[in-house]
Image (cartoon, grey):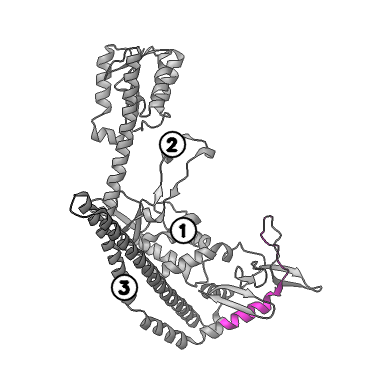
Amino acid sequence: MIGIYVRVSTDEQAKRGYSIRDQIEKCRAKADSDEIMEYVDDGCSGEFLDRPALNRLREDVKKGLIHKVICYDPDRLSRKLMNQLMITEEIEKRAELIFVNGEYAKTPEGMLFYQMRGAIAEFEKAKITERMSNGRRQKAKQGKIVKDPKIYGYRYNKETCRLEIYEPEAKVVRLIFDLFTRPNGRVKGINGIAHYLTDQKIPTKKGKHVWHRQVVRQILRNEAYIGRFYHNRWNTEGILQNKHLPDEEKIAVKERPREEWIEIPCPAIIDGMTFSHAQKLLQESRRRWAKQSKHNYLLSGLPRCGKCGNTMTGVYVKNWAKYERMYIDRKNTAGAKHPGCGRRVKAEGLEKEVWERIRNWLNHPAEIAAAGESEMIKQSSFEEEEIERIRSEIEKTKEGRKRLLKLFADGLDISETEIRESLEELKEREEELEKRLREWEAVKKQEENQLLSQRIYQDAVHFYLNKGENELTFEDKRSLIRMVVREIIVFEDHIEIKTF
């Protein structure tokens, strides 16, 4: 029995004409026999050995069912020289191996030529991969997205290579950010949002009706929603072979250095302040949204001991022959950095003090609004214009270096000393500009944080006044506190409330 092995990957079929039909026809002509069994791997990469048809062929050769194997070209067996030689040796131990595209004599010269062909095929594969990567990067630098990233809230336009807002999903994205950043008394944290979306039977990007907390977290962290999509962010080299590797050897996707990312503008769904607030809440989410305890604690996840720095957990303990709710800093879990200094405070007293402070803030909306307006007046386009101007100057210095090097390479009458001095001046200029840019960006960030704080207070006031103090439930109060308060530092004789 003669076995014919053919393989094609999608890119080769399109670019080089390695169609399955052509390979089979040429292999059958070479066999000149009717006793033929075909082994076809359609759309399989030659980089890996674990291919369905190739596995069957190797097994049939071992069993003696196949006495001759015909293949169009050695690179159909594998694109890697080492794998190609291994398969060749394995087949030739039990059967005859023939190639349509070239005959190789069993001589030292013939084997050398065969190995050279394999090395060339491996080199060619690497060059194809390199060219494709470079092509994608060039398109990204032109503001094009090379393939559909399948981001919830967007649709990919193949003609323009850009993302467009898909409003039915965009509404859900806004809902997720709203539930996470604003007090509502209904939904608790990321897990609560996932349950809420599932209960509402809202479909995911894949059309499923079950939302997982990790999907919600990914949405909350995705900068595409504020108009920043990044190409070349993740290094995925080698992950295609994960399906062939055991769990302990699987290759992890790694994030590239920030300077290698290519930013591609896309339409924003969420404003920058809401996104910034969400990131701050995410940093605290694990502590703030601990699992539900038997007894309710208004400040759960917020108090921290001012002496040892441990978080203070709500517990129900016996205190002077009476069980009470307490906040304590003791850590009994293995691996805790600090067991705690033993500070404990009655939950009722601490919660009352914190709520009174929050209530006083919320009962003076005019002061908060005035402060917000003051900050809005302070913010102007000056910072943005200055940042843009400095960035433009930095680009000019970089272009100046390139021009100097080009003039020197073209052989113009410029000495090497003059070139070096000019380059040093441009470098010093660029470093000074980079320093000023960082300073202005810090100023802008500070103003954005101030504006965010004012907006948070205003949202809290709106919720508080609309609901009415007497109508507030325990969950309403906890939502309001969590919205405004980042942390509560508990000292022996006083407390400090740190807000966003």
**Residue 212 visible to an observer of this rendering:** no
Q: Any magenta on residue 469?
A: no
Residue, disc 3: 386
Closer-to-camera residue (406/12): 406
Position of 391 relative to 101 (above/below): below
The secondary structure type at the circle numbered 2 is helix
Q: Which residues are magenta?
A: 334-357
Instruction: Name the front one of labels 3 and 1.
Output: 3
Q: Any magenta on residue 349?
A: yes
Residue 315: give x, y in percent of width and height: 70, 67
The quadrant holding residue 11 is top left
The quadrant holding residue 248 is top right
Q: If the image is split into quadrants, where does the N terminus sit?
A: top left
> Residue type at mark 1?
Val
The secondary structure type at the circle numbered 3 is helix
Residue, disc 1: 216
**Residue 469 visible to an observer of this rendering:** yes
The residue at the point 52 percent across, 83 percent down is 468
Residue, disc 2: 241
Residue 117: give x, y in percent of width and height: 31, 24
Disc 2 to disc 1: CB gap under 8 Å = no
> Residue type at mark 2?
Gln
Furthest-right residue in this view: 321
For label 2, the crowd category at 10 Å Cα-Cα, with few meaning under 14, some 14 to 19 and many 20 or more, is: some
The residue at the point 43 percent across, 24 percent down is 55
Disc 2 to disc 3: CB gap under 8 Å = no
Instruction: Name the front one of labels 2 and 1.
Output: 2
